[in-house]
Amino acid sequence: MAILVGKKAPLFEADAVINGSEFVEKFSLEQYIGKKYVIFFFYPLDFTFVCPTEILAFQEKIKEFEKRNVAIVGCSIDSKFSHWAWLNMDRNKGGIKGVSFPLVSDLSKTISVNYDVLAGDYIYNEDGEMEFDGDAVAYRGLFLIDKQGVVRHQVVNDLPLGRNIDEAIRMVDALQFFEENGEVCPANWNTGKEAMKATHEGVSDYLSKH
């Protein structure tokens, strides 16, 4: 698994559905550089079970992300038409109607490969033919990208394991606190809690209080 933290997030141009119903060609994360932070997350497939719970949980917290100047962008290996159909299906029928953030189509799986979240790999069989070994879907990868386009946090869950959206918000808060104050955030830090200076004295002072 590639560690992208500290590196520029891989850019791409791909089909996407935005605002729940609009098709966009050549959607790119580049539009956010210099303007917004980005939570870019992968999920395995449309019309599944754990995936809608995560996507709807992001939507429920969308105002929390927006007030932190964070854009939410989802991605799976489904087509833009599959995204559109799911986005326009009522929730009581298994759909995700009402979701407003972009869903990117990684039909070629190149985005998943570049972020190293594809659950499997292409191999050559005994006959010299290329085939896919594993599940040709993305793990539940999540990447927090700063306004310079650099990955500052990543987490990758296996397919059955849903993510904690509040933890994604906490990581945004920690990054923005560090950028604004220069202090680092210790274990279990939340907004309003004490941080510490990145010095031996700062660590000693913090530990003496806790």
Image: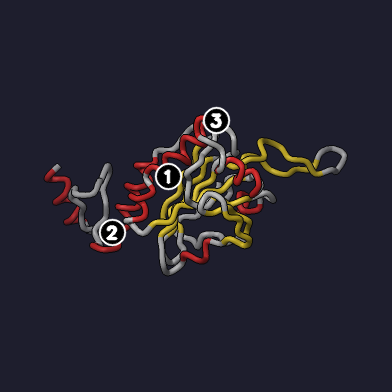
The residue sitting at 37% across, 45% down in the picture is 61
| Secondary-structure class at tag 2 | helix
The front one of 98 and 68 is: 98
Left or right for 89, reference 121: left
Mark 3 is on which residue type? Lys
Question: Mark 3: which secondary structure?
Answer: helix
Residue found farthest to the right: 127
What numbered label is drawn on residue 93?
Answer: 3
Instruction: Identify which amino acid the numbered label 2 is placed on.
Output: Phe
Circle nearer the N terminus (3, 2): 3
- Residue under pointer 2: 178
Q: In this view, does 130 lie to the left or right of 164?
A: right
| Label 1 residue SS | helix
The Cα–Cα distance between marks 1 and 2, rounded to whole angstroms, is 26 Å
Q: Residue 59 carries which label?
A: 1
Alpha-carbon distance for marks 3 and 2?
43 Å
